[in-house]
Amino acid sequence: MSSPFVTIGITAFNADDTILRAVLSALAQDWPHFEVLVYDDASVDDTPRLLKEIEAQNPNVRVVYGTENKGVAYARNRLIEMALGEFLAFFDDDDVSVPDRVLRQYERILAYERDFAHGAPVICHSARTQYYPDGVERYEATMGMDDSGLAPHGEAVALRVLTGKGGKAFFGSLATCSQMGRVSLYRGLGGFDEGFRRGEDTDFSVRLALAGGHFAGVAAPLVRQTMTMGAEKNLDEELALHLKLMQKHRDFITVHASYGFCRDWLVNKYRFLAGQRGAFLCNMAILLCRHPVETLRRLFRALPNTGFNLRFRRFHDGRQ
């Protein structure tokens, strides 16, 4: 099998306690031809010094230092611009990838392109193992893990992300920390929307789906994700970003579903996550009266995720 040059891209910001293990996991990939490209988004801790040390010791590590913090979308776009590889695999600054991650995702992409894609763009995510501060480990599935046929693709994926519609095949997250694709795909799509300080990965997935993209997954947890609680990771901010995403793609949603219902369901979901039990139950009753079929359908599909949603709430409340 030929081994094309791969860029492993890492965005870093104030990660002096985790950045070394992230870069070392990239350097430990059992792939013969790759570079590790790091964009430091104007860190104010010890991250730049640590990166300079590891860059000096490893000729295949390149580090670019931003002078102003502009967010992860901006940082990822700089990685896309500067990547020398044919493929780009994103690693996060606080995660560790297993040594055969690049190999397995490359093999998945090539096999899918050969057998199913017919020239359409293909992106690959892997499942993850999530490690919470209280010691709990959780397997997080990704979309498209069945490698026996067509993976989720096209508008159906955008519909699932934005409205919750879609069958079991469309379940699973699409996290950039486990993502790999051709550099030409990222550049052709215009990279990430820098108007999103967070949630840019979800918007990217929607735009790729609307462009006919296929989402091929790897069921093995190739990423070990440390769940950290940053200042920007609060429920109010998460809700605002999701509403912004819905507004951006409002025209598409309106064609396929009730925009008002989708928005009200999302807001009420965050009432549940925020522990606002009375407001949640009251508004759920209103949704049942106004949209009985759709509300029951969403409730039925949400039940298997109750445990995850409760942990998500405890995590964001700082009550792990």
Image (tube, rainbow, N blue to C red):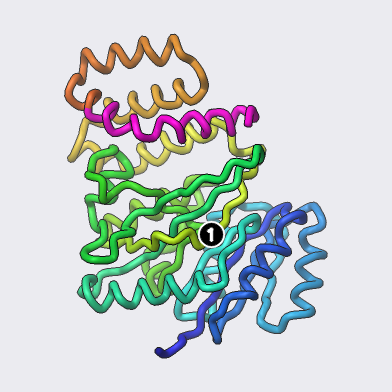
- Is residue 2 located in the magenta-colored stretch of the structure? no
Tally of marks: 1
Q: Quadrant of the C terminus?
A: top right
Q: Which amino acid type is shown beneath numbered disc 1?
A: Val
Principal secondary structure, stretch drawn in magenta: helix
Start and end of the magenta stretch? 297-320
Q: Nearer the viewer, residue 301 or 58?
A: 301
Callout 1 secondary element:
strand
210 or 9, which is in the foreground?
9
* Residue drawn at x 29%, y 38% as measured from the top left: 164
Percent across and percent down for residue 133 are 66, 40
Residue of label 1: 223
Quarter location, residue 67: bottom right
Q: Please indicate whether residue 220 sits to the left or right of residue 313 in the image.
A: left
Who's the residue at 59% across and 58% down the image? 92
Magenta stretch holds residue 306:
yes
Left or right of 292 in this view: 103: right
Q: Is 126 placed above or below 317 here?
A: below
Is 307 rendered above or below residue 175?
A: above
**Residue located 53% across and 29% down the image:** 313
Q: Position of residue 223 (x, y in %)?
A: 53, 59
Left or right placement of residue 298 versus residue 5 in this view: left
Tell me where residue 236 appears, x and y as whole percent.
Answer: 53, 28
Count residues near mark 1 (Cα–Cα under 10 Å), then give few for <14, some for 14-19, many for 20+.
many
Q: Which image quarter is the N terminus in?
A: bottom left
Q: Residue 69: horizontal and vertical position, in percent?
A: 67, 52
Closer-to-camera residue (69/318): 318
Furthest toward the front, the residue is 136
